[in-house]
Image (cartoon, grey):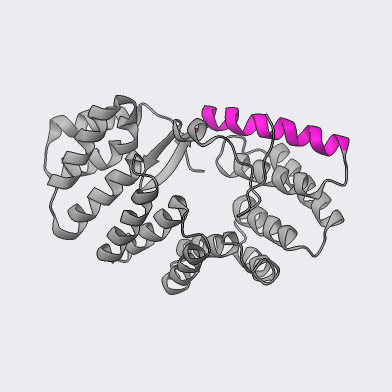
Amino acid sequence: MALRKSERDGQILLPAERIERRIYLIRGQKVMLSADLAKLYGVSQKRLNEAVKRDRNFALAYYQLAHAHDQIYFTGLDHTPARLGMADGAIQDLRRLRPNSGETHLAIAKHQYWCYLDYDRAREELDQARQKLPNDPLPHLLAGYIDRRQSRWNESTKNLERAVELDPQNPGVLQQIALSYECLRRYGDAEAILDRALALDPKDAAMRAQRAAMEFYWHADARPLLSTIQMVRDEDPQSAANTAEYWLEVALCLRDAENASRALAIAAAFSLCCP
């Protein structure tokens, strides 16, 4: 499979339909089965290994290879010293070729964040990446994630909002700021952002459920969420896993033991890992 470089963030792009069929929603986050992640990233990793074998000076391939190893390690698909060593090696080769490039600082930031949970070091690298890649949303997005993990909500919100400014047509970026608004109980802002995201991707079952859940969280009105979950299941039974956690949550709140058991059975059928 040929590789393409994203104009936004330099990541490996796989055909959207291949990825979307394997995405589920757990705790408001899109997740993927470990086996599916292995198949998708395995193809890319193989091609990247071939690329750097042919050309030891192919810096972009090392950047993307580091990303793939970091993700496989971070998700737990292969959380081993060997995988970490492969990620370390790709980073070292990238630093050898382009020690001061924005992409190198960005790759190191991701590596320190995902593999070592060294948020301070990751922030230092993201500061450098932002200076060299002023129009790239990814440094702001990653900084927003790190700040959110450390409950630095003001900083996180500013970073995520800046990522949206730089990449306003990306539903995934919009969904991330919506999650932060939800945590901050800014439900009106979350609804407005999710409406924008759904206008870009109206068939996204997980996002449809997330949007309907705002009325449940904000006004304790379960009807939009229940209606959306049923509509999604009627349209595509395979999408049930995308709404299972919302279904379980609303059923428990309504003390509906039957539907809670059905939702739990669907959720429990999947062994999931966060991307």
Point 61% across, 66% down: residue: 135
Across and down, in percent, residue 198 comes to 34, 49
The image quadrant of residue 203 is top left
The N terminus lies in quadrant: top right
- Please state if 138 lies on the left or on the right of 66 as rendered: left
Foreground residue, 15 or 151? 15
> Quarter of the image holding residue 98?
bottom right
Look at the magenta stretch and give its main secondary structure. helix
Task: Point out residue 231 in the picture as x, y percentages from the top left corner.
Answer: 21, 34
Q: Is residue 275 left or right of residue 215?
A: right
- Which residue: 83% across, 49% down? 93
Q: Is residue 185 among what the camera can see? A: no
The residue located at (66%, 57%) in the rendering is: 112
Residue 43 lies in magenta, yes or no? yes
Q: Is residue 180 above or below residue 44?
A: below
At which x and y percent is residue 180?
Answer: 38, 62
Q: Which residues are magenta?
A: 33-54
